[in-house]
Image (cartoon, rainbow, N blue to C red):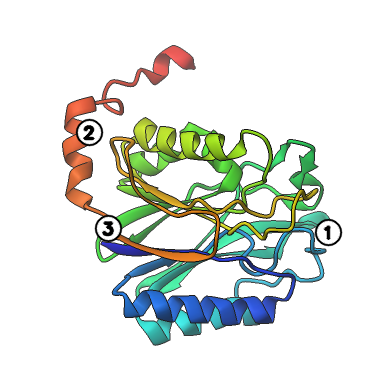
């Protein structure tokens, strides 16, 4: 399966960001990508008041993404914000395109490194997978990468890969953590992990997670197969679905689990 990671930088205007999604989707489709993954907060960057911008999944921004996916014959995965109870929003990944219509609300909220996502965002509660041309892929968002259980849940649901969208916070050691965690989650679940982050906006330190770039695709054996730097860039690569079965046969980490010990 050919996928594309769209490492861009979004701003506070959903309309302008939707035009970016269209531009990058067309570029990826021209390169033969079947699935195009955009970062967390593609609809509007963090640091923007989220509740006034949130839209339902049948609202104009999501419908715009659907039209882009339909026009290009691709599956587009993009981060947006949807209304939630208590004046908060859900940090949502929309996955849409011919034969695919699903959404995932971020389960693990980024209450870390001095930021409290839970003050404005309500947590999701449902692991989510999508099927594209008979290939099953899980969905995850940013801070989720620190929790191996989600990636194993994708594998248990039949996924051979996880699409991870992020707006990774900058800071000392954060790039090392990003790369280490993405590789570890691939090993934990013996799945492909395609991790796309917002590009580095180049504005210096920020009180909110903006982005550091360095999107990467990791194989089910934990090796990096493709990666980007900090600047906006499109990464197009192929996932060898058959490799997952071969790696699982060798390592057997899923088969050798003993969940009864930890209950």
Q: Quadrant of residue 100?
A: bottom left
Residue drawn at (65%, 69%) of the image = 43
Q: Earlier in the sequence, mark 2 or mark 1?
A: 1
Q: Secondary structure at mark 1?
A: helix
Q: What whole-number distance in Å separates the C-alpha atoms at marks 2 and 3?
A: 17 Å
Using residue 225 as the reference point, say whether residue 162 is left or right of it. right
Using residue 126 as the reference point, say whether residue 239 is left or right of it. left
- The answer to which of 211 and 243 lies nearer the viewer is 211
Q: Are marks 2 and 3 in contact (CB under 8 Å)?
A: no
Q: Earlier in the sequence, mark 2 or mark 3?
A: 3
Residue 31: % across, % down: 31, 75
Q: Earlier in the sequence, mark 3 or mark 1?
A: 1
Give the vertical position of 79 relative to 256 (above or below). Answer: below
Residue 90: % across, % down: 68, 57
Q: Secondary structure at mark 3?
A: strand
**Residues packed near mark 3 inside 10 Å, few (<14), some (14 to 19) or many (20 plus):** few
Residue pointed to by mark 2: 248
Of circles 3 and 1, the one toward us is: 3
**Residues packed near mark 1 inside 10 Å, few (<14), some (14 to 19) or many (20 plus):** few
- The answer to which of 103 and 44 lies nearer the viewer is 44
Using residue 71 as the reference point, say whether residue 144 is left or right of it. right
State the residue lying farthest toward the top.
261
Could you tell me which quadrant the N terminus lies in?
bottom left
Residue drawn at (33%, 61%) of the image = 131
Residue pointed to by mark 1: 87
Residue pointed to by mark 3: 135
Q: Are marks 2 and 1 in contact (CB under 8 Å)?
A: no
Give the number of callouts.
3
């Amino acid at each position: 399966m050919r996928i594309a990671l769209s490492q861009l930088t979004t701003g506070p205007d959903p309309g302008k960001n939707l035009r970016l999604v269209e531009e990058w989707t067309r570029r990826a489709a021209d390169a033969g990508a079947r699935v195009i993954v955009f970062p967390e907060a593609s609809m509007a960057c963090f640091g923007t008041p989220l509740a006034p911008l949130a839209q339902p999944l049948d609202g104009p921004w999501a419908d715009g993404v659907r039209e882009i996916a339909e026009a290009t014959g691709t599956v587009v995965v993009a981060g947006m914000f949807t209304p939630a109870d208590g004046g908060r929003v859900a940090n949502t990944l929309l996955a849409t395109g011919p034969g695919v219509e699903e959404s995932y609300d971020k389960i693990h909220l980024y209450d870390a490194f001095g930021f409290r996502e839970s003050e404005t965002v309500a947590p999701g509660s449902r692991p989510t997978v999508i099927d594209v041309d008979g290939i099953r892929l899980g969905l995850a968002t940013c801070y989720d990468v620190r929790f191996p259980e989600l990636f194993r849940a994708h594998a248990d649901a039949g996924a051979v890969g996880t699409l991870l969208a992020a707006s990774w916070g900058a800071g000392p050691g954060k790039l090392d953590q990003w790369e280490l965690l993405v590789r570890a989650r691939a090993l934990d679940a013996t799945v492909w992990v395609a991790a796309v982050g917002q590009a580095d906006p180049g504005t210096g330190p920020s009180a909110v997670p903006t982005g550091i770039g360095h999107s990467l695709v990791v194989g089910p054996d934990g090796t990096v197969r493709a990666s980007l730097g900090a600047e906006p860039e499109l990464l197009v690569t192929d996932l060898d679905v058959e490799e997952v079965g071969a790696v699982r046969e060798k390592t057997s980490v899923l088969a050798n689990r003993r969940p009864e010990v930890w209950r």
